[in-house]
Image: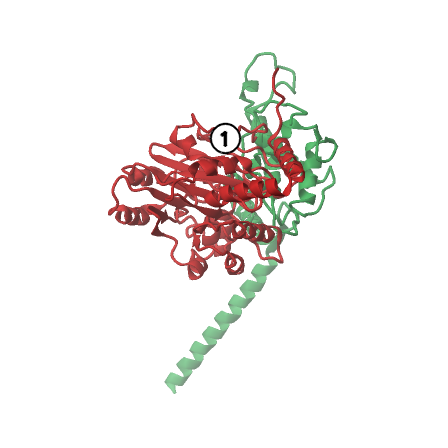
Chain colours: A red, B green
Amino acid sequence: MKPRIKSIETKYMQDRQEFFSGLKNLDRRSFLKVSAAAMGAAAASGLLPGHSFCPVSVAQAAASSNSSESFRFAYISDSHLYEKKINDRFVRALLRAVEDVNNLEPQPDFVFYGGDLAQLGQPKELELGAQILKDVKAPLRMMVGEHDWYLDLGQKWQELFGRPTYSWNHKGIHFVTLNSVVERDFWTKRGLTPMERMMTVAGLDNGMQSPFSVGRQQREWLKDDLAGYSNDAPIIVFSHSPLYKLYKKWNFWTDDAEEVQAILKRFERVVVIHGHTHQILTNRIGNIHFHGLLSTAWPWPYAPEGMPELTVEMNRPDPFNTNDGCGDGQVHVHPDGLVDKIYSLWNRKPITVARDYTASWGTQSIPLKPNRPSY
Amino acid sequence: MQNTSTFANFKFILLSAACLSVIIMIAACRQENQLTTCDGEGKVQVAKDTTGQALADALMDQWTRDHPDRDWTTEEKQRHELKPPADNSSLLTGGQAEGNTYGQPTERDLLTWTRETEKFVLEGSRIFHSADLLKSTVSVSCDMCHPHGANTHPETYPKFQTQLGRVLLLRDMINWCIDNPVRGERLEPDDRRMRAMEAYIMAQRSGTKMNYGKH
């Protein structure tokens, strides 16, 4: 008999119901046993998001918890803050994300912010964001997005958060953060004011702006930065835009992506984690594994063409729930440098794009397919 | 003595010249006409004997000054790419059109159709992309979730909107979005802005098969 197909949401609610009704039937001794096991598994992996019931992730966590080298970090991205008096919805969403990462037990090694903290680069927007992010308990690493940059060309952002391009080492992994939203000067010739420039860049589908790039200066810096690392060193790169060419019309695109990829090519395993696309997005080009980040503000539709084959799209978001398709998440870094990318969707069961999925070119650990495709 | 007399003469000549120019200017003013530009708003002064190209240029210059957004359709198209309307050039061929006004369009007709249709749609694009024109109280515009009108799927309407428990048309969903994420001013179904936004959203799905009721 053909099994009845249930939606992710239905399955989730049933799992949850079963879990809670099961708890009612336990005697004290069994309860302690079950809860200790659950806590142990969650604690060992940290894969259980603080706000979400997730048996699948617990099982995966148990399998990978043997290695003492693996670790995880959390992420928040694309909050697009207006001042609170203009629009408090996006502010509340960032507060929720901060609460999520602060509730993770044990705490992640660090929290990475993926760019576009502000909507229009206003000093008050960036200051508000900085103030909210001060509450993050774990160490915070920041990346810049185009919405943060193009009012004053990064002046305020750098004043608050420092240089946008930097690297560091953590537990055997070399991490690099780039500013991949460098645009050619399209404003001087047209005589645009700083605000007009900002408004142009802030429109995803505004064709007056230039494509994003990393630029020669940062590429040179990257070459130098990586010079001392052998080919088997695990590298994780953060960029706001995807470091490949997906869809130029929305700047799901980095113009000099091939040149950046060429610098990363000699390494056996590279992971690139990017913001900007506000969706579950997975790709692999040779040795480079790419993962997107969720936004706390709103989800974007998928690009109408050029989608990477490895991407299993998320279900079309429900406009009647302002949080649907939004969220934050975690990255579980394996000792070899490849990652399980966990998308902690606020209105849905979390989705994990496992290390084995990209490592096997999509033949193993395949995430569930959507039943409502993007238009 | 001689020098003083020469200086006095010189002053007299200067004064006469000044008076003469004032007289000429007054006379010239009397010879001017005030004209109104084609929009009925702009005013332009031209000498009475101005004719032909000079007259047209004067009027055009004034109209240009009065309409700094005169190229808004071109600019809007550059800003937000628009799918082009259908190509009707095949209508210029065929032999049965003689004596049939409807069946005998000219190239000029085709250009007019394209230009006017695009203008209608571009007005929708302008509103779709502007929190101000949508009168949003939270600085949200449609393109923030629907770049280039993506994920608006006009071809699926009318359909039963599960969340509201009734059948909606595209315009109902536009108004729902204005009410909710945009927090703007709800539009009457025949409001100029509603018609323009419907036009833009449908134009952006050109070539997609109609599929009403699809979820």
Residue A226: tell me if it is visible: yes
Seen in the image, is B76 located left or right of residue A66?
right
- Residue type at mark 1: give it: Pro
Is residue B68 or residue B168 the one in the foreground? Answer: B168
Residue A29 percent coordinates (x, y): 60, 42
- Residue A8, picture quadrant: top right
Is residue A232 or residue B14 the one in the foreground? Answer: A232
- Residue A319, picture quadrant: top right
Q: Which residue is mark 1?
A: A367
Is residue B75 or residue B214 the one in the foreground? Answer: B214
Quadrant for the C terminus of chain B in the image: top right
Relative vertical location of residue A156 with respect to residue B214 in this rendering, above or below: below
Seen in the image, is A256 located left or right of residue A89?
left
Residue drawn at 30 percent across, 50 percent down: A217
Residue B75: tell me if it is visible: no
Residue drawn at 47 percent across, 28 percent down: A366
Seen in the image, is B37 located left or right of residue A182?
right
Host chain of mark 1: A
Q: Residue furthest top?
A: B96
Residue A304 percent coordinates (x, y): 51, 31
Q: Residue furthest bottom?
A: B1
- Residue A257, picture quadrant: top left
